[in-house]
């Protein structure tokens, strides 16, 4: 009997912090979110958030804009079309894997 091999999740997105960032941006009513808002809402350190954003930006999944608001530097973060597509494919893969497990074990209750 041949077992179905699950897809290999997109490694950039699969990392917990980056997944949280992408989901936050995708579900935000705002097109662009400021760095301090993202940092606070996701309860991340500035250093960790910066590293994760750099990885996502290098992958083309987010766009960063740097400017000033008044005299203060401002970094805006928004999900790119490429990032939205990658996130949707990732979520579809996860959903497919979950459905395969649920079909195999239909009697198990969701916890």
Image: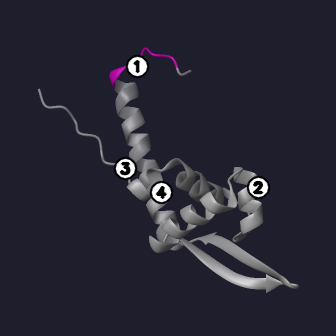
Query: Helix, strand, or loop for circle 1?
Result: loop
Calculate the distance from the C-alpha at mark 3 to the C-alpha at mark 4.
12 Å
Calculate the distance from the C-alpha at mark 2 to the C-alpha at mark 3.
28 Å
Magenta segment includes 91: no
Mark number for residue 9? 3
Q: Position of residue 83 (x, y in %)?
A: 50, 66
Q: Which residue carries the number 4 mark? A: 88
Q: Is residue 70 left or right of residue 57?
A: right
Q: Which residue carries the number 1 mark? A: 106
Q: Are marks 1 and 4 in contact (CB under 8 Å)?
A: no
Q: Residue furthest front?
A: 47
Q: Residue furthest top?
A: 107
**In the rendered image of this protein, does residue 42 appear above or below residue 50?**
above
Observer-nearest residue: 68 or 22? 68
Observer-nearest residue: 56 or 2? 56
Q: Which residue carries the number 2 mark? A: 40
């Amino acid at each position: 009997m041949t077992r179905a091999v699950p897809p290999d999740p997109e490694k950039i997105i699969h990392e917990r912090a980056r997944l949280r960032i992408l989901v936050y941006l995708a579900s935000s009513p705002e097109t662009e979110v400021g760095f301090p808002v993202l940092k606070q809402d996701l309860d991340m350190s500035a250093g960790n958030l910066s590293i994760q954003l750099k990885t996502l930006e290098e992958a083309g999944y987010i766009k960063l804009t740097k400017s000033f608001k008044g005299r203060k530097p401002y970094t805006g973060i928004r999900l790119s079309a490429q990032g939205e597509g990658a996130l949707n494919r990732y979520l579809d893969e996860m959903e497919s894997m979950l459905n395969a497990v649920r079909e195999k074990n239909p009697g198990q209750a969701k916890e």
